[in-house]
Amino acid sequence: MPSAEVFSWLRTRFMPHIWCPGCGHGIIMHALIRALVGLKKDKTQTVVASGIGCSSRMAGYIDACTLHSTHGRSLAFATGIKLHKPSLTVVDVMGDGDCSAIGGNHFIHACRRNIDITAIIMNNNIYGMTGGQASPTTPAGAWASTTPYGAIDPPFDICRLAEGAGASYVARTTIANPKQAETFIMNGIKKKGFAVIEVVTHCHTQFGRKNDRRLPLDNYNYFKAVSVPLTKAKTMTPEELAGKLVCGEFVNKDVPEYTEQYDKVIEKAQRR
Amino acid sequence: MPDVAFWQGNTALAHGALLAGCNFYGGYPITPSTEIAEVMAEELPKRGGKFIQMEDEIGGIASIIGASIAGAKALTATSGPGFSLKQENLGLAYIAEVPIVVVDVMRGGPSTGLPTKTAQQDVMQARWGTHGDHATICYAPSSVQECYDLAVKAFNMAERFRQPVLILSDEVVGHMREKVTMRDPGRVEIVNRVRPSLPPEKFTPYEANPRTGVPEMASFGDGYSWHVTGLTTNDWGFPTNNAPEIEKKMLRLLSKVDRARSDVVEYEAESMDGADIVVVAYGSVGRSALRAVRDARKRGIPAGFFRPVTLWPFPGEELTKMALGAKTVLVPELNCGQMVLEVERVFRGRSEVRGISLLNGELFKPSEIGRVIEEVA
Ligand SMILES: Cc1ncc(C[n+]2csc(CCOP(=O)(O)OP(=O)(O)O)c2C)c(N)n1
Ligand code: SF4
């Protein structure tokens, strides 16, 4: 049961929510709110931005300064918010389609700029909202309504993408480890820079149903079975790692943050 | 700053925006609009404002909508290809009622078309480019001075009506140099969005003032936790599927500009009294047309000149009233005939309406319009 403090961050007026019973997105919302509560954040100084998708509906349910924007573009909106008012805590919640398909360009550039935004990617390997079409993270061979003969394109590794593009914090966990999700989200928010937390979750309705993980519990058990902590993964061979999901903090480094860099631009411009 | 400057239209437009209080610019470079971004990149940080070159035009408009929600007066500028990319998010700003100013310095299209040549082919895109119904406010400057002055007005209208305001400039106006008289910042009218009059616990984010049809606007970070969405919402800003609530929201969105139409609509007219032939022209073409009308008058032809400054809302009532006895209405445009459709619509057959198209990337010479005036005289 969520605590009273967590409840106070929910817009119950907005409910019932649209998520299917058992959808993993709720677990992630709970972890995010626990992290915000744990960090003693003020609702009026906290922004939750999102794009479009089942996952993105989360923004509406959280009682903060929330923006439910357009499909894939939320990081660009969030960039404007953060740059104009750097004192705000900005979290951006996205689906895998939102982040890595239509929003891929905004994603890599937010990583590159290293702007102080915490991006939470709810990766359910599918387009949930529109009924189960393939996403850039749909595993090769998996069924989706637009890959009725099995997906042929290799999936993205969102964490490696973020690392390559320059994010200062990159971590992955699954909904089977909500405590870790909370910790990683907390660490991401605390990080001065662009933080990416990929939370692998399920869409049992659209993906699981056709890929042998029909029940929410099947997915939970699957995530438990395939998760490997990063420390252990480092001792494993590529063959041993095949089909596994490596979880942990991949990047945690200090790089100049964009809005602070811009403050220096202002100083320079005003000195002239 | 001196009282007068000799500026390009694009430079003047940027300075007008700064005068209006613009403190955020997000965009992506494209000819012939780029000078606006360059001036903002240099000037904004001097004033403590922010400039960001985004990864594309979609990100450019998204960033300014975000900044505006956080309280900024925000601008983006582009040209045809970028204007196309901005359309989806423009719709978000309409439905979520976010004040922004978007400039399109027109060049020839479709597609990459004529990057360094002029055109007026985005007139209907400005009106209907984003999907879904919405009210449009769109200015078309025809001089460098007007680039400066209309930038201020565009911001004022965006703030007043809480919606995007468009400026359709064109390559000729954007790149030509003319004298600009600066306005005294202390004496220029500056409008700012109406802030919430109620404390957070009593504030209903989309409950409109019954007189203006415009809701008060909180900013992220100023003590209010509220929701912004592109979904159709009720007064609470929460998505709704309830037919009466949907209708209420749509009717309010569509009527808020119309209610104050006379404050918005602008035009310039000359020699309209008793004019048999009326030339309706806007933007850079307005300059050639005015010259053509003056020349015709000198030759004794009763010609009149009417220039819509707001393309949308179109000053149709004003035009038809002034052109009551006109036999022929000529509409020269640098496109295959866009505004002429609106002119035909407002005249409803009362006068003969005739479009004159030029599609070669050049501006009309006054004599080219003059020839048609003589032909119909
Ligand atoms: C520009 C645009 N294209 C397509 C859509 C339709 N659409 C809505 S949500 C969505 C995909 C959502 O998938 P994801 O981001 O992975 O989130 P999920 O629903 O799985 O949580 C799509 C394609 C849209 N809303 N906007
Ligand atoms: S369709 Fe899938 S992603 Fe969407 S709410 Fe249902 S289970 Fe969750």
Image (cartoon, rainbow, N blue to C red):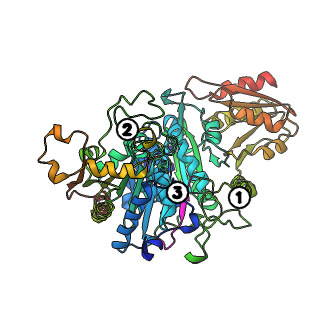
Q: Amino acid at mark 1?
A: Glu
Closest to the camera, between mark 1 and mark 2, is: 2
Query: Residue B214's x, y, as percent?
Result: 66, 63
Q: How far, Cα to Cα, is label 1 from label 3? A: 46 Å
Compared with B89, B218 (above or below) is below
Query: Residue B323's x, y, as percent?
Result: 83, 40
Closest to the camera, between mark 1 and mark 3, is: 1
Label 3 crowd bin: few (<14), some (14–19), many (20+), radius 10 Å: some
Residues tagged 1 and 2 counted as in contact (Cβ below 8 A): no
Residues rendered magenta in the picture: B222-230
Q: Is residue B224 magenta?
A: yes
| Count of marks, rendered view | 3
Compared with A269, A34 (above or below) is below
Q: Is residue B107 left or right of residue A193?
A: right
Secondary structure of the residue carrying tag 2 is: loop
Residues tagged 1 and 3 counted as in contact (Cβ below 8 A): no
Q: Chain of mark 2?
A: A
Q: Is residue B86 magenta?
A: no
Label 1 crowd bin: few (<14), some (14–19), many (20+), radius 10 Å: some
Q: Which mark is residue B182?
A: 3
Q: Main secondary structure of the magenta part?
A: loop
Q: Which residue is mark 2?
A: A138
Q: Amino acid at mark 2?
A: Thr
Q: Does any portion of residue A89 appear in the rendered image? A: no
Sequence-earlier tag: 1 or 3: 3
Which of these two is toward me, B269 or B123? B123
Instruction: Identify the residue at image location x=34%, y=37%.
Output: A139
Quadrant where the N terminus of chain B sits is bottom left
Q: Which residue is mark 1?
A: B245
Q: Outermost residue, left direction?
A: A235
